[in-house]
Image: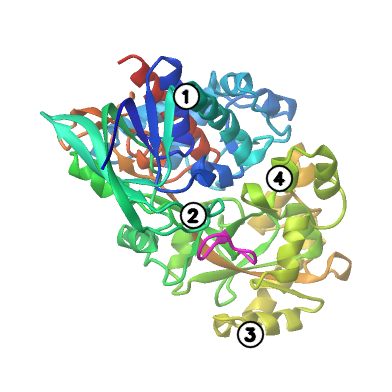
């Protein structure tokens, strides 16, 4: 057995773990980071992300003519979260603290670390209900210049330098299986040493055990992420309010996001709450070039595509693309089918389709201004989108609606599609485009969206008929449920200390990131406002790291 001694043991080298390590090591603590994956995965799930961040009243917003405020953001957050449980005490406190962070020093702190932001602010989770309903009242989605890797880099660089200096130790292929508790206090962890692996980032690795280890520590931080790579666990925790879990799901996170630290932390006394709160997308497409098993990519759609269920019926108001993720998931789960459809045009796909993930956005990830100009501001679909049009098994491209429907029906599950209903939906929608007046709420919202300069520039196509030959060809996209985030986790106080079932802190045990529901055991409540997952890892990791620095 290999044995180690450290001040702080951090389990998981995702963004939250790296941030906590930086804060603790800068205060003079000896930090050891362990992870079950090879070193190629440093940065965890955040590396794969689009790098969206939620800011309130930022310079980018003000330059785009957006009037935001802490009060409006608070109204949106709490209306979206829907906190309604006794165990929401700490999630509420974390939500208020995070809002203060997002409206305060979050941006300047990141800027001091060299992190920059794309100047056009996106409008995610638009809601479409009343002022006290869920959703963002204004655009708040700030894209990191460099996407997920751009967020991870300053913290990964710090760990690399601190490792050379001797203040941080990184132990890949170390899987924690137990947390050591002595006289009521956590004093370290034990686990398996896994066989070395040279696998590339994100590629599934073996679980062959070649040894064991023990690490003594004054404090242990669980920063091991969520459960999205473990479909059995996702289905086991699936809430009745979202209907039945899908038989067929795509995986939006690497396989190592498996929830394996949940029972380990629970055995040490940690209180897991809100496990039935989760965040999965309904715009998932099968990756034509997968990295991990069942690898899916999420479409980040603009507001123009016609959204149909598996039978060809249009989704109800306000379940339009980009408006209400979980509302759409709930509706679709009650249809009895695991898929739905977008119908759109070449003109729409060129302007409105973006793909989530750092690897799907080489211009933003590579900070390549020339490539950005040619892909986002000129004609034609962006390269990664065009690759899916050419090779993606969920994409159908045809010149006529009849032929489009033929090919939709030929795909697996396409036999559920009612041809006449699809034609009715498309023709009815197109008739509404003949006037500046409309009773179609999606068309009204589409026209309203173009009043925002950011949408008009890069995210919203000029309104047109789907059957307009000059806008063609027609495109259909088969959409799947894509697993992504756990909104619940270990209950923590504002220092990130894990609480037991009686609400008392467990001495020496902390949690950060998705393992803590991004703070408190569920800072988002039932729903999220987007741009708050990466930000939740930053904030919770920083809170824990600073609390450790003061111990």
- The tag earlier along the polypeptide, 2 or 3, is 2
Residue marked by disc 4: 449
Q: Mark 2 sits on what residue?
A: 254
Q: Looking at the rendering, in which quadrant would you find the C terminus?
A: top left
Q: Secondary structure at mark 3?
A: helix
Task: Examine the rendering and report whether any part of residue 171 can be seen.
Answer: yes
The mark that comes first in sequence, 1 or 4, is 1
Q: Which residue is mark 1?
A: 22
Local SS, label 4: helix
What residue is disc 3 on?
Answer: 410
Alpha-carbon span between mark 2 and mark 1: 24 Å
Residue at left offset 84%, top offset 57%: 380
Q: Residues within 10 Å of mark 3 (few under 14, many from 20)?
A: few
**Closer to us: mark 4 or mark 3?**
3
**SS for tag 1?**
helix
Question: Which circle's residue, 2 or 1, is located before the other in the chain?
Answer: 1
Which region shows up in magenta? 287-296
Q: Residue 292 lies in magenta, yes or no?
A: yes
Quarter containing the N terminus: top left
């Amino acid at each position: 057995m290999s044995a180690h001694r450290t001040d702080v043991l951090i389990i998981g080298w995702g963004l939250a773990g790296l941030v906590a390590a930086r804060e603790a090591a800068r205060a003079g603590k000896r930090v050891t980071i362990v992870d079950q994956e090879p070193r190629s995965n440093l940065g965890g799930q955040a590396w794969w992300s689009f790098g969206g961040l939620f800011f309130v009243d930022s310079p980018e917003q003000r330059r785009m003519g957006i009037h935001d405020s802490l009060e409006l953001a608070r109204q949106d957050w709490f209306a979206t979260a829907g906190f309604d449980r006794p165990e929401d005490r700490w999630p509420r406190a974390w939500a208020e603290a995070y809002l203060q962070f997002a409206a305060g020093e979050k941006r300047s702190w990141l800027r001091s670390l060299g992190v920059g932001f794309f100047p056009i602010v996106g409008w995610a989770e638009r809601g479409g209900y009343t002022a006290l309903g869920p959703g963002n009242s204004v655009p708040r989605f700030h894209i990191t210049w460099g996407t997920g890797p751009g967020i991870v880099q300053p913290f990964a660089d710090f760990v690399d330098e601190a490792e050379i200096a001797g203040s941080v130790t990184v132990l890949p292929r170390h899987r924690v299986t137990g947390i050591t508790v002595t006289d009521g206090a956590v004093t370290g962890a034990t686990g398996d040493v896994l066989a070395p692996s040279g696998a590339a980032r994100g590629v599934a690795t073996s679980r062959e055990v070649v040894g064991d280890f023990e690490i003594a520590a004054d404090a242990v931080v669980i920063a091991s992420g969520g459960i999205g790579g473990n479909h059995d666990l996702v289905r086991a925790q699936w809430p009745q309010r979202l209907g039945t879990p899908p038989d067929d799901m795509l995986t939006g996170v690497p396989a190592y996001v498996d929830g394996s630290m949940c029972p380990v932390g629970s055995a040490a006394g940690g209180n897991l709450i809100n496990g039935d709160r989760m965040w999965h997308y309904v715009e998932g497409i099968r990756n034509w070039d997968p990295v991990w098993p069942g690898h899916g990519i999420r479409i980040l759609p603009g507001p123009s595509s016609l959204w149909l269920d598996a039978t060809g019926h249009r989704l109800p108001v306000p379940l339009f693309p980009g408006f209400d993720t979980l509302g759409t998931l709930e509706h679709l789960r009650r249809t009895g089918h695991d898929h739905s459809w977008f119908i759109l045009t070449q003109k729409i796909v060129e302007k409105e389709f973006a793909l989530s993930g750092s690897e799907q956005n080489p211009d933003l990830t590579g900070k390549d201004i020339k490539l950005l100009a040619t892909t986002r501001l000129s004609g034609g679909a962006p390269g990664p989108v065009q690759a899916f049009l050419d090779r993606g098994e969920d994409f159908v491209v045809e010149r006529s609606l009849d032929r489009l429907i033929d090919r939709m029906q030929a795909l697996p599950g396409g036999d559920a599609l009612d041809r006449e209903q699809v034609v009715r939906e498309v023709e009815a929608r197109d008739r509404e485009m003949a006037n500046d007046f409309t009773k179609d709420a999606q068309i009204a919202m589409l026209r309203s969206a173009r009043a925002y300069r950011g949408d008009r520039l890069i995210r919203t196509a000029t309104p047109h008929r789907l059957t307009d030959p000059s806008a063609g060809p027609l495109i259909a996209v088969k959409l799947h449920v894509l697993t992504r985030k756990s909104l619940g986790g270990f209950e923590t106080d504002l220092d990130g200390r894990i609480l037991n079932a009686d609400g008392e802190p467990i001495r020496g045990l902390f949690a950060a990131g998705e393992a803590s529901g991004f703070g408190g055991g569920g800072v988002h409540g039932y729903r999220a406002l987007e741009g708050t997952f990466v930000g939740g890892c930053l904030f919770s990791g920083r809170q824990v790291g600073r609390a450790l620095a003061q111990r």
